Amino acid sequence: MRCFTITSSAISGDIKPYLEVVAKPYPHVGVGEEGRGRKYVRFPLGQRLAESLADYVPCPRRGHVVYWNNQGRCPDCGTVLQKGEGEGFLHPDFGEVTKYGQLERASVLKTHKGTLLLIEEKDPADKRALVLVSIEGGFRGSTDWTAATSRVVPCPERGRANAEFTSCCSKCGVDYPAKNDELLLSDENIHPEEGFVKVYGAFPPAGITVLAEGYGAEGAAGRAGGPHWARLVIMEPGSVFRVRRYGRLYGGPKECYVAWDGELLRVGTWDELNPPGREDEVGVLI
């Protein structure tokens, strides 16, 4: 399977045709974020695949002062540190760290223990895509994932009092009848028996398999915004799903769609993925 990474920058077309591999504590693809109010999931690589991507480079801490970490060793390469002045330790001019290359193709193996593992590609003809999706919401917002298909149903606010004290329903747009043009919570300020809303199908839709799920957030405690869902998924050819973005978007799209046709991965609004020009130009000249 081909591998891709989709972040918020992908909304403007920046889709990465690979997965990043994180070295510690073992080779893995990271899903989500670490920290309070966040969830980080490590999706591991098999040993042979990890070794094929591994490269050994000089430790970036060489010649620098490393402060005491209760181990006396470099936290990156494990080299024994030399005692320096004060509380610092000097890193000697040797020591290497493992750096992993970009993962462009892979297969997913379910082991006898039931765990999932990324391994070297076994079937080059596999037209599915392995995609890490981490599209964030707006400032102090969140994301919600749904199917791309929807249906129209009666507004759930029908017959309810106008608790929001607004002139129209925020869900369907129907105007509330207000007494003397004042928004009062009265018998005359009840949602009319009219108005419809669009409801999207649940995630994951057909053709999408979720392998791992994490999420990010905003703020030191993760309470300023979120969750911003991140998922590692397998997409069948022809599959598509929707990500709804909440919060302050500053001109960015409120929703975007991710579609895979077996050859091309696309991200954008519904109109961008389905422009009118793609429809069959069949009709009657006028």
Image (tube, helix red, strand yellow):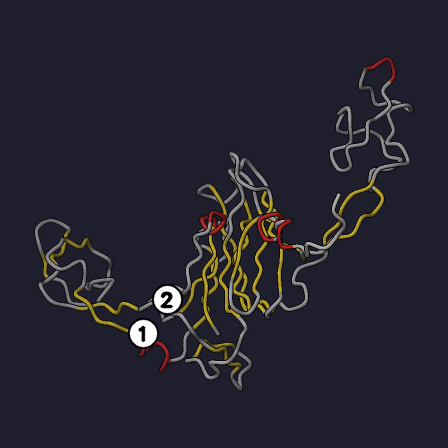
Taking the view exactly as shown, the residue that stands out farthest to the front is: 285
User: Residues at badges 1 and 2 in contact (C-beta under 8 Å)?
Assistant: yes
* 188 lies left or right of 32: right
Taking the view exactly as shown, the residue that stands out farthest to the top is: 180
Choose the circle earlier in sequence order: 1 or 2. Answer: 2
Q: Which mark is residue 69?
A: none
Q: Nearer the viewer, residue 219 or 234?
A: 234
Q: Which mark is residue 53?
A: 1
Q: Nearer the viewer, residue 128 or 64?
A: 128
- Picture quadrant of residue 162: top right
Q: Amino acid at mark 2?
A: Val
x and y percentages locating residue 31 in the rendered image? 47, 61
x and y percentages locating residue 12 in the rendered image? 47, 47
Q: Which mark is residue 21?
A: 2
| Residue drawn at the location 42% of the way across and 63% of the way down | 17
- Picture quadrant of residue 62: bottom left
* 155 lies left or right of 27: right
- Vertical relation: 39 (above or below) 43: above
* 55 lies left or right of 19: left
Q: Nearer the viewer, residue 70 or 250?
A: 250
Say which element carries label 2.
loop
| Residue drawn at the location 46% of the way across and 84% of the way down | 122
- Vertical relation: 224 (above or below) 274: above
| Residue drawn at the location 16% of the way across and 65% of the way down | 58
Q: Nearer the viewer, residue 239 or 164?
A: 239
Say which element carries label 1.
helix
x and y percentages locating residue 185 in the rendered image? 83, 23
Q: Amino acid at mark 1?
A: Leu
Q: Residues within 10 Å of mark 2 (few under 14, many from 20)?
A: many
- Vertical relation: 186 (above or below) 144: above
